[in-house]
Amino acid sequence: MINKNLTNHELLVDDAAYLMDELEALKKVITTIPYSEKPLGQDSIQEMIESIETRQREYFYPAILKIINELGVNDSDSEHFIFNNSNAADTKSSNIRDVINEIIRIRSKMINMMRECPSEVFNDSSNSGQNDKTLAALLTDMVLFDRNQFKQIAERILTIDLDRQTGKPEITNK
């Protein structure tokens, strides 16, 4: 149910935070499915998760952080948090749960930063360095990208589960 007392930016932030719940749920089942298998012509579940982590780390977090810093509403240690953290996941060599934990770690920091931002900052377009995207636009892009990835992951898990129930082997490219 939508809380009518929330602003649009609070709803967006809550939507991004909800996706962390999806990640927590995925983390519980990920080792029970063949996450590295690639159905014909599609990415593996692992590749989809890695793409979320990569886009978040390389695009969304830096872009959001830059805007927040330019608008003067951010703490000074946030850049250090993301770019100088020796615990950052190497998605090509980490186990899948580590990658999911890294997404959650960065997402949690982003959510906390955005919850501290005043509403008017979300639609401020004075940040011409990021293709004129506002915080609201970047956050919307991130949520839509994540939703699409999670939808594909959920569909894949359902297919795997159905195949297991019917005894049908999944055709894959490894």
Image (cartoon, rainbow, N blue to C red):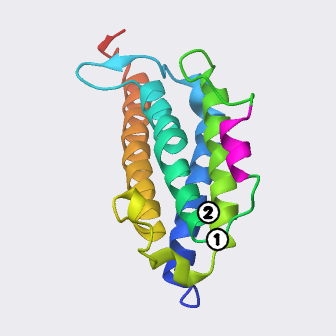
- What secondary structure is found at the residue carrying circle 1? loop
Mark 2 crowd level (few <14, some 14–19, many ≥20, 10 Å Cα): some
* Depicted 143 relative to depicted 40: above or below: below
- What secondary structure is found at the residue carrying circle 2? helix
Q: Which mark is residue 48?
A: none
Whether the residues at callouts 1 and 2 have beta carbons within 8 Å, the answer is: yes
The x and y percentages for residue 168 are 33, 18
Instruction: Determine which residue is flagged by label 2.
Output: 69
Q: Name the one closer to the observer, 130 or 109.
A: 130
Residue span colored magenta: 78-85
What's the residue at 48%, 19% (across, down)? 34
Amino acid identity at mark 2: Asn
Instruction: Determine which residue is flagged by label 1.
Output: 72
* Depicted 113 relative to depicted 86: above or below: below
The x and y percentages for residue 137 are 40, 66
Q: Name the one closer to the observer, 66 or 104.
A: 66
What's the residue at 36%, 32% (across, down)? 159
Side (left or right) of 90 relative to 132: right
What's the residue at 60%, 22% (across, down)? 90
